[in-house]
Amino acid sequence: MFTSNPFAELSAFISPAVMQAYIAVMILMVAAGTLFDMLEKKSATYFFRAWRDSKGKATRQLGGGEMTSLAIQTAVVDVLASGEFCNVRRRIAHILTFYGFLAYIITTVIMVFSYPTADTPAPAILPVLWNIGALMVLVGGYWFWFFIRVDVAHEGNSPFRLMRADLFIVSLLVSVTLGLAWEIAQATGNTAWTNVFLALYILSTTVLFMSIPWSKFSHMFYKPAAAFEKRVVEANGSSNLPAPAESPTGEM
């Protein structure tokens, strides 16, 4: 089950061209939704204004080498290692969800576009990575949802309490959960449940990618830019944040 391409089995009922067109539309929805989110919230305007102001307030100019070093630090620490999270549990949950989502999405695209039918069997590693990615998303996502969220852990609210900010993580978990349920039903040969889970899987995935203007999905695209800008203003002396307080012994 975990080594066969579930989308190749689906091609017996749905044309590969339809599946590929659906993914293309979802990619366009991500781009359009992110652009709309940035324009509506004026994130890009705020970023460029802050960048321009930091240049005017800088106490030292940064060279090309320093800027490159800061960009690498941002990519490695803030993006790849989720360095923005001080809480270790939250960082691990975020890393599991982030890398799992990347593996899940990338392998989905490869299998649908390069190995869409049973006549072109996909290498076993692709469905294996698809399943591993999905399980990483579920472990990291459900761990965060039930045990790490601030309002659940510290305010005693119900873990089922939903807010607009929860739209991305909830739709992601529902989509991936239903994707695995569809794959399992397909492997067992239960046509009725396969069709039910497939329909719900498509619906939840559509909600995930078309709700970007109202969810936190787009944050993953411009948060790296904000992290880089923060490093730059700290390095050039234009940051308006207070310096870390010293302890009575003079240590940081």
Image (spheres, grey):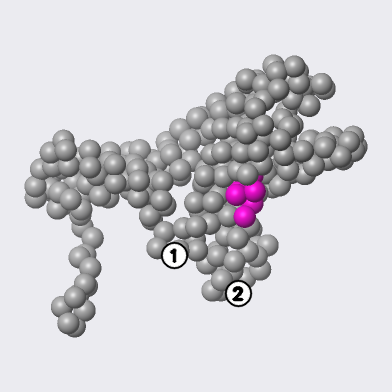
- Observer-nearest of 23 and 187: 187
Is 182 placed left or right of 128 in the picture?
right
- Disc 2 marks a residue whose amino acid type is Gly
Residue 87 badge? 1
Q: Please identify, in this view, whether the residue under mark 1 or under mark 2 is nearer the observer.
A: 1
Q: Position of residue 62 (x, y in %)?
A: 13, 42
User: Residue visible at 40% across and 41% down?
Assistant: 222
- From the image, tell me which residue sits under label 2: 156
Q: Position of residue 185 (x, y in %)?
A: 83, 40
Is 66 placed left or right of 72 in the picture?
left
Residue 138 badge? none
Q: Earlier in the sequence, mark 1 or mark 2?
A: 1
> For the magenta stretch, what is the residue range?
134-139
Is 163 placed left or right of 230 in the picture?
right
Q: Quadrant of the N terminus?
A: top right
- Observer-nearest of 160 and 188: 188
User: Residue visible at 21% across and 49% down?
Assistant: 233
User: Callout 1: helix, strand or loop?
Assistant: loop
- Disc 1 marks a residue whose amino acid type is Asn
| Badge 1 density bin: few <14, some 14–19, many ≥20, Cα 10 Å | few
Q: Does any portion of residue 78 appear in the rendered image?
A: yes
User: Residue visible at 64% across and 48% down?
Assistant: 135
- Magenta stretch: dominant secondary structure: helix
User: Callout 2: helix, strand or loop?
Assistant: loop
